[in-house]
Amino acid sequence: MDASKQLLVMDSSPQGRVTESTSKIMNTVSLTLIPALAVSVWVFGWDAVRVLALTSVFCVGFEWLLSKWVSYKIDYMDGSALLTGILLAMNLPSSSPWWLILIGSLVAIGLGKQVFGGLGQNIFNPVLVSRTFLIISFPVELSLWPKPFAYDGSTGATPLGVLKTEGVGALSGTSIGDLAMGQMGGSVGEISALTLLLGAAYLIYKQYIAWEVPALFIGTVFVFTGIFYLIDPTTYADPVFHMFTGGLFIGALYMATDMVTSPLTKKGRIVFGIGCGFFTAVIRLFGSYPEGVSFAIVLMNGFVPLLDKYLPDKKFGMVKNG
Amino acid sequence: MPDIVIAGLVLGGFALISSSGLLYASKKFYVYEDPRIEEVTELLPGANCGGCGFAGCSAYAEHVVKEGSLEDPCPVADSETMAKIGEVLGLQVESSEKMVASLMCHGTVQNSELMMDYEGIEDCWAAMLVADTTKACAFACLGLGSCVEACPFDAMHLENGIVVIDDEKCTGCGICIPTCPKNILHMRPYSKKVTVTCNNTDKGADARKACKVACIGCMKCEKVCEDDAIHVNNFLAKIDYNKCTNCEKCVEVCPTNSIQIRGQEVHVAADV
Amino acid sequence: MSVMEKFKRAFFTENPVTVMLLGLCPTLAVTSSAENGIGMGLATTFVLVMSNLVISIFKNVIPARVRIPSFIVVIATFVTIVDMGLQATLYDLHKTLGLFIPLIVVNCLILGRAEAFASKNTIGQSLLDGVANGLGFTFALFILGGIREILGSGAFLGMPIIPGDWRTILLFVLAPGAFITLGFMLVGMNKISERLEGTKS
Amino acid sequence: MLLRTFKRGGIHPPEEKLSADLAIEYGEIPGSLLVPVNQHIGKPCNVLVKKGTAVKRGDVLAEADGFVSSNVHAPVDGKVQKILNFPQLGGQIKECIQITPDNPGESYQSVLEGDTFQEVDVDGLDRDEIRKTIAKAGLVGMGGAGFPTHVKLSPPPDKTIDTLIINGAECEPYITADHRLMIEKSDELVRGIKILQKLFDDVMIYIGIEENKADAIETLEQATKDEVKMKVIPLKTKYPQGGEKQLIKAVLNREVPSKGLPMDVGVIVQNVGTLKAIYDAFFYQRPLMERVVTVSGNVVKRAGNILVPIGTPVSYLIEKYEIDKSRIKRLVSGGPMMGRTSYSFESPVSKTSSAVLFFDDSVYDTRDENPCIRCGNCIAVCPMGLPVAQVTEMIKANNVTPDIKNYIMDCIECGSCSYVCPADRRLVHWMRFGKNIINREN
């Protein structure tokens, strides 16, 4: 063949693409987590950095190892494994020992993602699979939450934990402002609602995540807990407290909106958001675990294929014109 | 021991009632199934390839038993198996020779120049939506492997931009034939190794320009053939396998190497 | 078929649990420890062997159309014997296995062997088949229970083998752990048989 | 100004209308023309000429075979050199009639000036006569699909047509051929529209133009200001505004039913280029032998709109516009969103080639398909409301179920989904492949 002859490219239309790519989306999501991470470091000290570094290295590492082993192609540097690592760090207490992080990363990448066939194929959010796995398997480690600004490693319960064990009375004195800024015990990323909101607002602006899911998620929790607060304020905490404590914000803004495990259509996203909120509130109010966000999201993840199938968008031309 | 007697009587009576119910049901709801269907199914290769046009081997067995004839034989089974199936059905089966799929093209990228840098979906039909050919010859094998994908017996492979068929692995099921958008796969008897490896019906000069090993319709093969087995129609030679005796004279005489012996392909065209 | 081949098939190439996926209900439910796995497996083996024996003896007497109910009656008889026998001799094990002993009746492995093998073969062959498949089943349950016991409670056959200050993964003694472990056992099994087939051809 | 648009989906790719302000130029007659025999959707034509036949400009080279077919005329005086199969713009190989012109190099403008204008009494025209003239002139939809115009204008008697929409949306990037026609030939267009108006009782005419062509809107509003039943509708700049179904939705808020045609909602849509051709056919007795082609892309030194005879090879345009051949990686006929690639520089311009675009790798370089991350962008932008991600996965798995088929057949192949896919999945190609699977089954 004549090497100097230049062959024209033949391809199907369209002859153009947006500049988006999978790794760009993943990396942007990772970048928007920086403010929340900064607050975590401020509150929990260098331990938060340690957890973050370990989860990131382990998650990317496991993805790399699995890419050698499985029969399909894995692009371990596309940012998705890194994002899983960062989000996993945000779901763990900063006091997590290294082996816990190792197991958590393996579960997230292996069991949460690659057994289903890799990126895009997993039914459940890998990070939350890992978190629920760890909560069930290691109840001791996952209930020791470091106290804010106590860089000495002393631990205590989260506000929700206090609520569950000691009742509403024990909560007097916690100010909502402190909670919103993140001055409470909790896992690395779940503490500062405002910075998470900041990051997510950018993602919503970039249309990487749908606003319906977090809005309805948080709204449903607020309404549901509000109803019970109005019925009996001595037994149930007020809805604003529920809104700003625990993993509700990171769950609603970053976990429930995960592209792979949330519905494709607007209608599906609305049902998904309300469902997540409902289950979170039910678990928080009546369940045996103090926090229900991760269970609720994993539960609703299971419904996503059904939502996709039975709540499609209206097809053009389905209405007969008179 | 009155207790055990009562228990025995109760259970026994219950058993009696139940069994009469079963008896009634077995008579009332009996469905006759020809036992030969199972026999035939067991004789069949069991690959469930679908080459016969039925949904798997048992569906084919049901068909042949119901029809009581072997007019459309299992394309994969050898003649011995078909004879056995014939025995089950009480039929005489003429032994038929194994057929294999054969590509009527030798337009490797060396012979027929690639005309484009195709970057769409790796499938011949998908490529046909973008362009009618990928090579200089409009009749050539596209070399994207729709048939390779479809072959259930791993008998087809891509080599140098065309499909190469392994006669030993090919069972002659014929699944690949309709998967070719260029319609250049056909069946030939296993023992007849001489094939025309071209499907270009353009005039000689145009065909030659498109591919170095194209059939130019020069009629030399037709003249040399003593068995009246090869004919040129529409500038393309075609072998009648009922008459071909594998004498290989046409192979020797072909000026463009467009008649080839399977298993001994000449890959580069002769300089004419 | 030789005895060796029979055992190889039952243990490996056609293992009831990891290849045929038969009798998964007891497999998943009672294998929280290796001991439970063995107990369940042996109880099933007993029922399997005895029912195979009886069915192969009476195979010519049982009418084809009512064979399934007849098989079930035979199997149920032996399950009742096992249930009572365990209650009398190994009360603790009986308590852990609980409902799953009576549920052996509906284990498809037993009915499957009765239908596919014992009702068509000689007494000796059927006995051998029962023993081989029962032990294959027991073997799979033992492995599954063993893995779950080591990971979930840090012990093997009741003996602690992991240093005391190490944590065990609680999830593995719970039901999800059984599913996850079985899943990975199937993966491993497929990988091994793929490799063996590769060396053969 | 409240701009009309279709509601669902759509995208806004960079407009890149490089040649929007450049007047239509006239080409010369090239040294050799390849006139494709089959330039329309429908039955192929019967070739009437042989090698060596001398033809005059306007002679019928190939005759329509049946109703859904269209004549092909000789664009120049010359001699038939050869009849051969040749790759077209768009990749297919079709039969072509190669003509060696008598006067190569002659300005096409002077050829056109040789034609004589003849006033036609529009009111006196008979409806069948109009359709017959249009059929004889070999008119096809010049927007890209190439459906014979006379067929489109002959709806079955049970369909009443109350609206005629003139499609001047030109929503594809780069293309400006219709834009320039609307500015420079507005009076001709209006006269063409008046002929169509005769075909139907009491028909309202809307001219839909995207707002990024403000000068065209203004010119046509000027030209139609005395007409009661003609109205220019400015539309929002949004792709695919010019898709037939989307245009009807935007202008009239009527939804063409799934699997239906515009005439099911009482509408016929015509491209502005077709109207200019109708004008030529009636007032100059000139069949469809030429068209305005936009030459653009990112490797051209200067873009342009040029009027060339049909059959002009692309290599002529490359020479005329001094394009560096070695930089061309993609040769696209039509717009970048729906246009098809071609592989030969000798491919001829046909009745449906609205633009010839030249690109290198920097605009779009094919990347490998990555796994779908279910972002849902393809579904959000689909103007037809199809669950693209799921449908294409099913096609890929070769699992085309009846309800999937329903979705596939509604795809208009606008390319919005592929355009926004962050994982570089070839969604349109899969959709087209799905249609192919369905066609093969039938």
Image: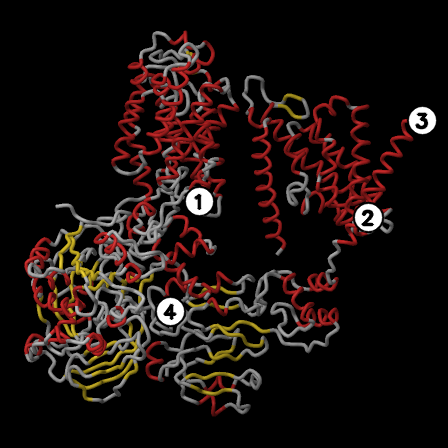
User: Quadrant of residue A105 in the image?
Assistant: top left
Pinpoint residue D3: horizontal percent, then vertical percent.
Answer: 16, 48
On the same chain, marks 3 and 4? The answer is: yes
Observer-nearest residue: A283 or B249? A283
Q: Is residue A144 above or below residue C137?
A: above
Secondary structure at numbered mark 3: loop
The residue tagged with tag 2: helix, strand or loop?
helix
Picture coordinates of residue D178, whole percent (x, y): 15, 62
- Give the letter of the chain under mark 3: B
Chain letter of mark 1 equals A
Q: Are marks 1 and 2 in contact (CB under 8 Å)?
A: no
> Residue drawn 12% across and 80% down?
D104
Cα distance, mark 3 to mark 1? 65 Å
Q: Is residue B94 left or right of residue B181?
A: right
Do the numbered discs 1 and 4 sit on residues whose CB atoms are within 8 Å?
no
Q: Which numbered tag is attached to residue C125? A: 2
Task: Say which of marks 3 and 4 sits in front.
Answer: 3
Which residue in the protein does label 4 denote? B109
Q: Amino acid at mark 4?
A: Val
Cα gap from disc 2 to disc 4, whole angstroms = 61 Å
Residue B24 in view here: yes
Give the residue drawn at x 39%, y 26%: A89
Q: Give how far apart the Cα atoms at labels 3 and 2 are.
A: 40 Å
Q: Chain of mark 4?
A: B
User: What is the crowding at mark 3: few (fewer than 14 residues within 10 Å), some, or many (at least 20)?
Assistant: few
> If you read the primary sequence from the N terminus, does the residue marked by circle 3 or circle 4 appear first?
3
Could you tell me the amino acid type at mark 2?
Gln
Residue beneath label 3, please?
B1
Distance (Cα) linking label 3 and label 4:
94 Å
Q: Nearer the viewer, residue C34 or D245?
A: D245
User: Left or right: where does residue D35 sit relative to residue C32?
Assistant: left
Looking at the image, residue D253 sits to the left or right of residue B32; the answer is left
